[in-house]
Amino acid sequence: MSAAVTETTTDPGTESTSDDQTGRRTLRAGAFGHATALSCRECGHKVDLGPFYACPECFGPLEIVYDFPAVTREEIEAGPRNIWRYKALLPVPTDIESSPNTEPGFTRLLAANNLARELGIEKLWVKDDSTNPTNSFKDRVVACALSAARELGATVFACPSTGNLANAVAAAGARAGIKTVVFIPSNLEHPKQVNSAIFTENLVAVDGNYDDVNKLASEIAGEEEGWAFVNVNVRPYYAEGSKTLGYEIAEQLGWRLPDQIVIPVASGSQLTKVDKAFQELIKLGLVEDKPYKVFGAQATGCNPVATSFKAGVDAIRPVKPDTIAKSLAIGNPADGIYVLDIARRTGGAVEEVTDDEIRAGIVLLARTEGIFTETAGGTTLAVTKKLVETGQLDPTLETVVINTGHGLKTLDAISGQVSAAATIAPTYAAFKATGI
Ligand SMILES: *Cc1c(COP(=O)(O)O)cnc(C)c1O
Ligand SMILES: [Zn+2]
């Protein structure tokens, strides 16, 4: 799994699972469903399906291309209530349900009427991904990466992570019975560390920020045989999992696209893939073609994409993150330039908010809709509010915001904001004295 930029000669038609002469495992037929190749996002160069993520010609990121079958709404609706209902549109085998995994997805799309009133938006939905198996949207991408790791014959399932990804990898690996090793910045929130350590013996805390951890992971991936780093050497497969957020939102709206959608941005992968999902649904005739605007949300303490958007430039200048939104703290986002493209193409924007606004966003969602989100969700909420206030988001159009994680993982960020209203003696008189 170490080769990043070499082309393979694997024959997708063979049934064999034995190693070929190169020592590389031969793919079984249909290992990646209807995926046909990897294609460079920058130059279009094609590479055979395999453990590759960078273009051998220009080092651009590789992306999965497909030859989709004719898929109907009815076929999808008859599928399981998890992401595998969209398996025909993912790089996974047709028998994917029979492999142990955490079965994420098909999370609720909530009509957020109280929040809508508070923000002055006419029709607002919250896509609540905090209810996934390890309480973040990362279970989706990890389920797809696990399938790829399996098909590629990996013996170790690993990741560099800002927290949620490590939780999802550790849990999915435990269920699949594959060794996991997860790497995190050592200053990560304690609950996120425990939520990984409960599933794996191999949680490695690295003294450095996420970008340092990511660099270390790339180095290990290049040295060690058989390691599938979900967001490094199997990143093209992993990233496709985020498309299911887009598919679900469209299906849950009654096979329609929303007018506007607000999505948090760390590496930018999720935002990019939700747009890809909408485009695919249009091409497949599963939804009507219509304009929609995509908005990205960042924290001011880690705002490289928002900064470039506002400056009107195409390049991303990396930053050193310093924000309570640790799950979004990627200073050098791999898909940042594609987020800029999508926000500009669709008439959206990439906006940023301060840590205080993020805390207020967490409280706002909790008090209006009974959803406890983490700092990433607080960022998305606060950005939505700011987009309305600054006239960038049209409050008369139907809007979806994605809640990507759970507040119990980032308790420290908010515990200073909310507390017991009073501590009293166990008497009626003491209670009356509180004025509640
Ligand atoms: C990872 C993560 C994101 C952002 O994901 P990218 O695809 O890297 O942009 C958003 N929210 C939460 C809670 C996350 O863990
Ligand atoms: Zn290329």
Image (cartoon, rainbow, N blue to C red):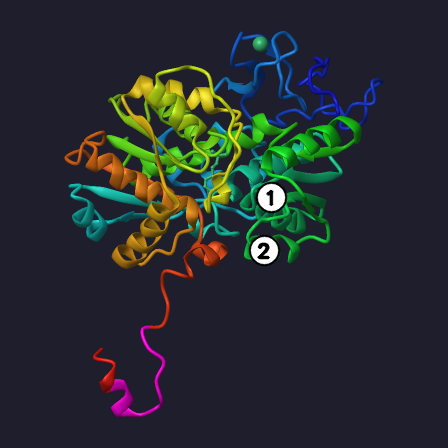
Q: Is residue 284 visible?
A: no
The residue under the point 36% across, 64% down is 418
Ranked by sequence position, the earlier of labels 2 and 1 is 1
Specify whether residue 402 is painted magenta: no
State the residue in front, 315 or 70. 315
The numbered disc on residue 195 is: 2
Residue 278 relative to residue 216: left or right: left
Residue 139 rendering spot, x and y as whole percentages = 53, 44
Specify whether residue 428 is painted magenta: yes
* Quadrant position of residue 402: top left
The numbered disc on residue 166 is: none
Q: Give the range drawn in magenta.
A: 421-431
Which quadrant does the N terminus fall into? Answer: top right
Which quadrant does the C terminus fall into? Answer: bottom left
**Label 2 CA crowd tier, 10 Å (few <14, some 14–19, many 20+):** many
| Kind of residue at disc 1 | Ser
In the figure, 423 relative to 48: above or below? below
The numbered disc on residue 98 is: 1
State the residue in front, 333 or 429. 429
| Kind of residue at disc 2 | Asn
In the figure, 203 relative to 298: above or below? below
In the figure, 344 relative to 44: above or below? below
State the residue in front, 421 or 63. 421
